[in-house]
Image (cartoon, rainbow, N blue to C red):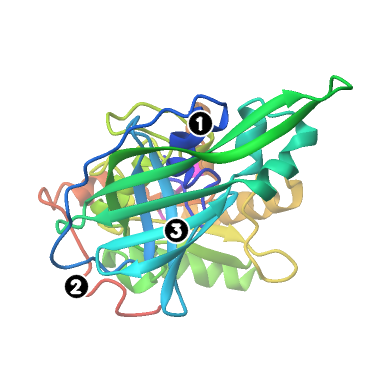
Amino acid sequence: MCCCVTRTSPYVLALFLSLLLPAAAGSGASLAGSQTPASAPAPALAGEWHITDRLGRFHTAVIRRQGAGFRIDGEGIHFELKGGGNEYSAEAPIDRATLVEAGVPAELVEEVVRRAVVRCTFSVHSDGATIDYTIHNPLIQFGRNEEGELVILDVVNGGASSGSGVLRRVPPLNRSLGDLHPDFRKKVDRWLKRLKEEKIQLVIGETYRSSERQARLYEKGRTLTGEVWAPAEVVTKALAGRSPHEWGLALDAYPAGGDGKPVYDVQSDAKMLEVMTRAAELADEEGIYWGGNFPGNFVDYPHFQDAGWRKIQARYPSGWQPSRPGASSH
Ligand SMILES: [Zn+2]
């Protein structure tokens, strides 16, 4: 229902690649874009973002400071950003998987990656929520040699394509037990004590989640209009306002593996599933319901929620939030 997101999504920054695909496949359409000059305050770039491509599909990008500039990381693509304020430029090789998907023969992929570079510039609008971008596409010309083998004849600068995207910050994950609703917290404390007595070690993944974060999680794998385009990316079925996490009435927890690190894939590990099942029995005795017991395909193994969460939620028709989110570590 409101599964936990602790890993970086596998798609990411296909924003640029999806725009560049037609060129990589040989069409090289050219659109000289007129850009709205950006002005005024630039948002603090570091953090996790959702960016839409021209089809309105959301992609996840993680931006970190690197030296004097920034770096964008996504699955299979890494951009180093140059620039500052609202204007940035970046260069990156083409993602291998994208080339294969586009029909580039496997034996030519490495050569394409070596020779072709994607250049992009973008400007962040002063609203901090939209960007204009221009992608400079390499144009790869394939042909056959005298032996009839497919070869790369040339890599030249293709046309530029421009567009706009929606930019949304994904608020960071909160693991603080101190930010749970006090009613739920009491139950959780009793539960954790009993887990300790049985030497069951769980790692807390996420506790309170703001409605803004819930809204961002809902976007993963979806488009601006809410359609699913990347089913593997979907992490929640709950729109903002529908998850008990938003009232501090749920938490996600994972069994700890031998190294003390969380085991995310409980389902395919019989021993870990057994640990979770026992943890869930103890939870049940404290008035905490386990997502592993959700019916049908709603099953959410790491998820635990107050068994009476809807009653508590009803006391806060206009929402609930901890007094100082993230202020206490435990
Ligand atoms: Zn959850």
Stretch of the chain drawn in magenta: 286-291
Tell me the residue that label 2 is attached to. Answer: 323
Q: Nearer the viewer, residue 271 or 92?
A: 92
- Where residue 121 appears, as percent x and y from the top left, is 36, 53
Kindly give the residue lying farthest to the right in the view shown. 147
Q: Position of residue 303 (x, y in %)?
A: 47, 50
The answer to whether residue 246 is seen in the rendering is: no
As drawn, the residue found furthest toward the top would be: 148
Q: Secondary structure at mark 1?
A: helix
> Which mark, by number, is residue 90?
3
Q: Quadrant of residue 99?
A: top right
- The CA span between labels 2 and 3 is 41 Å
Per the model, the C-alpha gap separating discs 2 and 1 is: 52 Å
Question: What kind of residue is marked 1?
Answer: Ala
Q: Disc 2 or disc 3, which is closer to the eye?
A: 3
Q: Which residue does the image show at 35% across and 45% down from the upper left?
A: 134
**Residue 298 drawn above or below residue 254:** above
Decide if residue 51 is in sight here: yes
Quadrant, the N terminus: top left
Q: Which labelled disc corresponds to residue 23?
A: 1
Q: Is residue 82 above or below residue 37?
A: below
Is 60 magenta? The answer is: no
Q: Label 1 neighbourhood size at 10 Å, few (<14), some (14-19), many (20+)?
A: many
Secondary structure state at the residue bearing disc 2: loop
